[in-house]
Amino acid sequence: MFEKILIANRGEIALRVARACRELGVRTVAVYSTADADSAVVRFADEAVCIGPPAGRLSYQNPAAIVEAARLTGAEAVHPGYGFLSEDADFAEICADQGLLLIGPRPEVMSALADKATARTLMQSAGLPLLPGSVETVDSPAAAVAVASEIGYPVIIKVAAGGGGRGMTVVRSPAELPRAYARTRADARVIFGDDRVYLERYLAQARHVEVQVLCDGHGNGVHLGTRDCSVQRRHQKLVEEGPAPALSAGTLDAMSSAAVRGALSVGYSGVATFEFLVDEAERFYFMEINSRIQVEHPVTEMITGIDLVHEQLYVASGVPLRLRQDEVQVRGVAVECRVNVEDPDRDFVPTPGRIERFRPPGGPFTRVDTHGYPGYVVGPHYDSLLAKVVVWAPERDLALNRMERALDEFEVAGPGVRTTIPFLRRVLDDAPFRKGRYSTGLVERVLGGPATAARPPAA
């Protein structure tokens, strides 16, 4: 096991990793921008190094500053968390050149899987089913029209280098395609520095289901169950649950086995999330692979009892997998709600400000991953995620009731500060959601429906 790890991230995930390291006796180095000098992880870590001003490209996305911080503090490895540089193969290579290990797959594997078009080709070779569309990238409007004509509308244009829900455009008719194609490529060039795109058939009523995979560097791999992440707004997840509800055991097993097969086919090492779309007939289609820890990883931890960050660290240090597939048992149901500092009544606009009252929920089988505290200032520079509320129960109905109770208890208040808690309550009250029969269109339907009066917080 490592002696010292640098955590190249911020917010709740940085604190989550630091806690896991302390439990394993590993010393930690937090890096922070000037905007995060008073953050919870800076207070918690064994050491902390300022790496730049608030702008992400000058701090958390600045490889030179992070590597120098690791060199100065004697860190042996870098945990990237999620976002920022977590799936940047160039950063992984820079770390390797400097004698540092970036916790995750080998740089060449990360590079191949970060390119969604390449990942599709690799997974097709491993026998995973793909949606009808272009396996390779589509390099001209005429080629895009030809693909769309063959697979039928609606189609979705996806950026090969995209991620985090960005770089996707749905096209519903031939007349829309040339302009949407040009706009998507132009946006991709600006955002990702790579304008390659591919097309897929768009499933309007699909389920978004993930499989959590864990592999070591010795050719071993297991899956740790499924998560349903269909509750999304503009491809950003809001509510996750595991295992995925209202799907047959046969479908879940087949999807999970396919994910492990795909991971081992490319020599993957570490934690990975395989994302699938599932149609109304329970046919599943590979979408992409996330080569990092996921925001929603606590869902898997709650239903399996396995600490994913611990396992990440063991695997990265060269230890073979410490569990076999037959030792992985999924028990009960876990649900996670993301509490963002946003105003749902104003199109989810971020509402930064000072938090004066902060009282997270408690009670049995209730977990809150957060970096918030009374007096914490939510700035305008980064993602608006403040906390993740996760609950577990033996049955889904009780888990949903427990989540409602937890959200009722959660108090966040400050001048101008709003959160997504009222909207999350509306989702939990939605009848199709309660039945476990919902799709990626749920949020738009809830937003278009009549408003539900927000319940006051519990006393």
Image: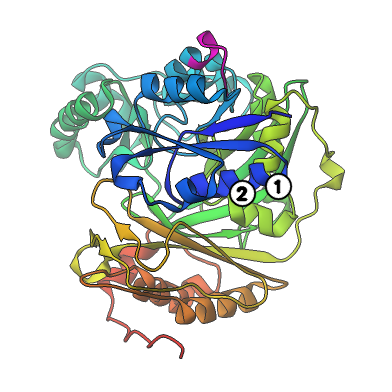
Q: Is residue 355 left or right of residue 40?
A: left
Residue at x-position 80% and y-position 27%? 320
- Vertical arrangement, residue 166 with respect to residue 125, above or below: below
Residue at point 46%, 91% (across, down): 459
Image: magenta residue range: 95-102
Q: Check contact, mark 2 vs mark 1: CB within 8 A.
A: yes
Left or right, 288 with reference to 106: left
Q: Amino acid at mark 2?
A: Arg
**Nearest to the observer: residue 271 or residue 309:** 309
Q: Position of residue 129 (x, y in %)?
A: 57, 33
Nearest the viewer among 111 and 136 is 111
Provide residue 306's location: percent of width, then percent of height: 73, 49
The answer to which image quadrant residue 377 occupies is bottom left
Amino acid type shown at disc 1: Glu
Expressed as whole percent of the image width and height from the top left, the position of residue 311 reads: 71, 38
In the current view of this chain or complex, which residue is farthest to the bottom?
Answer: 459
Per the model, the C-alpha gap separating discs 2 and 1 is 6 Å
Q: Is residue 185 magenta?
A: no
- Residue 23 is labelled as 1
Q: Measured along the vertical axis of the image, is residue 371 above or below residue 445?
A: above
Marking on residue 159: none
Query: Is 164 in front, or is 57?
Result: 57
Q: Which residue is mark 2?
A: 19
How crowded pointer 1 is (Cα within 10 Å; few <14, some 14-19, many 20+) is rated as: few
| Residue 210 is at least partly visible in this image | no
Residue sitting at 37 percent across and 51 percent down? Answer: 38
State the SS at label 1. helix
